Amino acid sequence: DQCAALPGAKRWSLSHIRAVIALSAPFDIAEHYEFEQRRAVHLLSGMWGAAGGHPDAHSAVTLVRSLRRFSTNPQNNLPRIHVLHATSDTTVPEYESQHFVESAVDAGIHINSSVFSIKGTHFSIVENLMWGPPGAPRPTLDFLRHVIEDDIC
């Protein structure tokens, strides 16, 4: 009730988005749920419920694979995609990010062909964007600045 109404569909466009950067994400919900089952934490996770029991319908991997059916040249319609993954991530394994990158490359999407690794954990790379003592290293923020300078400016 307190949320502002979204603009009409005619106003939505990806043309103003220059790049997307994904951080240590579970791109394939079914694959990630299997990983959680092996760790015996799947009952604590919201993965299956978040997907409404249909993980493939909400999977980024499924989405990029399906783009070939709708566009002969999907890279012309999407912003550049970068994938960043923490080197010590025990929440989402790095192979999930690599599978997404491979699926995007196969679909012809404009994406870096490798996952950028950054020192840290699943939570530290995101926390690094939000807070840091003065003068402390901010590797995630430094990476984002590098992307902006190289790809956008």
Image (cartoon, rainbow, N blue to C red):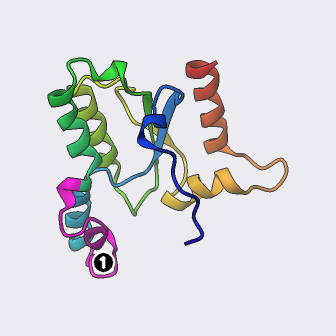
- Residue 36 located left or right of residue 146: left
Magenta portion: prevailing SS class: loop
Residue nearest the viewer, comparing 37 with 65: 65
Q: In this view, does 51 lie above or below 16?
A: below
Q: In which quadrant will I find the N terminus?
A: bottom right
Q: Is residue 133 above or below residue 143?
A: below
Q: Residue at x 59, y 19 (%)?
A: 150
Residue nearest the viewer, comparing 57 with 125: 57
Label 1: which residue? 41
Looking at the rendered structure, the secondary structure element under dot 1 is: loop
Quarter holding residue 33: bottom left
Quarter holding residue 26: bottom left
**Residues in magenta, as a range:** 39-57
Q: Where is residue 129 in the image (x, y as percent from the top left)?
A: 65, 50
Q: In which quadrant will I find the C terminus?
A: top right
Q: Residue at x 31, y 35 (%)?
A: 101
